[in-house]
Amino acid sequence: MKKYAKLTMAMIISIVLFSSCAAIIKVDDKVQDNIKEIDETVEEAICENEVPENTKLDSSQAEKDNEAVEKQEKIEDKEIDLQKVKPNEAGQIMVVMYHGLGDTEKTYVRTRENFKEDLRLLYEKGYRPISLKDYINNEIDTEAGKTPVVFTFDDGNITDFNIIEEDGEKKIDPESAIGILEDFNKKHEDFNLEATFFLYGENPFRQKELIDYKLKYIIDKGMDIGNHTKGHENLRSLSAIDIQKTIAKNIDYIKGYLPKYDMNTLSLPYGARPKSEEKRKYLFKGSFDGTIYNNIGALAVGWKPEHSSIHKKFDYKYIHRVHGSSEKFGIRYWLEYFDNNPNKRYISDGDKDTVTVPENLKEVVDENKLGERVLRTYSIEEESE
Ligand SMILES: [Zn+2]
């Protein structure tokens, strides 16, 4: 009830103060937890590029005046939600690994039907895509009660991103991974268009004349490109210099198309990494021929969900992935696992400024990673039958 009262109030004030964006922003801010979507629509429609400088200042002063009241309201709202939402931001997250799509299911080929069914199941069960970078950096902004999931596609297969010609016009193949993801996102706006494509070599996505278009398209849509080395070498058998060379050369190649894009995640070809710590450090920091890199994470090939990045055991140097397959330890296996073990699953509290975990998981949170955020714990009340 409270939600609708606030919503109505916001809408009335929005209309009355049509020309004064400052007032609208103030109201928006006050009710942001409940009407985030309305906020954006109102701001976009009315305020875009039309806020005079002095009004902005008034607005921020007014916001400060109300800060204490708003904070109190927020806390009250959140505490009511805790037992219902049962957030667990120390829970596990699936980083799903796909390669190509096809008509027949193979170890590294997902049928289109199975891929679509993966998306449908994920959505229905409350999973919502986030970017790999946000996962590693622990900047998770998933809606309260939902579980983040990360999509990755290795090798730049044409079935991941294919352009076809229809009636003399070029268009994205609706049956390629990007086409399927975009279609699903159109039908379910809260299923964000987030995926990282790990590319190597000279012809990512295998349509040479369209490399430039495709790479820019991915970044323009807010998705990501990751490093899969230049030559898809087994990094276990390379020298320190050759490790740096293959990582840096791939960066040079992508920069040829996307000079400003920071490609800073690495998918280990074959999941292999050097044995010695001395060599492993070059997976993350190194340089070759003037190109310096800083990778924020390296991805393995298998076979299980990974810790939340706020968890003490989260290791950005070797992030496990779940196979996009129906085999054992594939995505379907783990979806069922989390259905049966909901307490293992990451559940968002919907607030970027807090990290919320059940009381018994307080100890696993790496407090060094909290930064400005507040760690909040709660005890789960037993539900009465
Ligand atoms: Zn590969």
Image: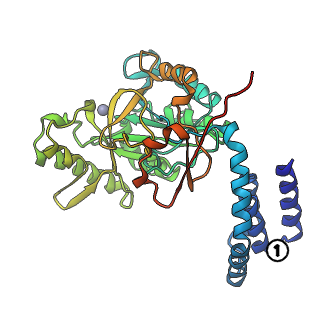
Q: Position of residue 319 (x, y in %)?
A: 35, 37
Asked whether mark 1 lies closer than 8 Å to ligand 1, one says: no
Q: Residue at x 61, y 27 (%)?
A: 120
Q: Is residue 170 left or right of residue 203?
A: right
Near mark 1 (Cα within 10 A), the count class, few <14, some 14-19 or many ≥20, is some
Q: Is residue 372 left or right of residue 4?
A: left
Q: Residue at x 23, y 59 (%)?
A: 292
Where on the picture, by quarter, is residue 363? top left
Q: Which residue is mark 1?
A: 19
Q: Nearer the viewer, residue 259 or 271?
A: 271
Where on the picture, by quarter, is residue 152? top left
What SS does tag 1 mark? loop
Numbered label tally: 1
Q: Nearer the viewer, residue 66 or 199?
A: 66
The amino acid pointed to by label 1 is Ser
Q: Is residue 243 above or below residue 126?
A: below
Q: Position of residue 309 (x, y in %)?
A: 43, 44
Q: Is residue 146 above or below residue 71?
A: above
Confirm whether residue 207 shows in the render: no
Q: Residue at x 83, y 55 (%)?
A: 7
Q: Is residue 248 left or right of residue 365?
A: left
Query: For the C terminus, which image quadrant?
Result: top right
Q: Position of residue 346 (x, y in %)?
A: 53, 36
Q: Is residue 236 left or right of residue 367?
A: left
Confirm whether residue 153 shows in the render: yes
Q: Position of residue 230 (x, y in %)?
A: 24, 43
Q: Residue furthest bottom?
A: 54
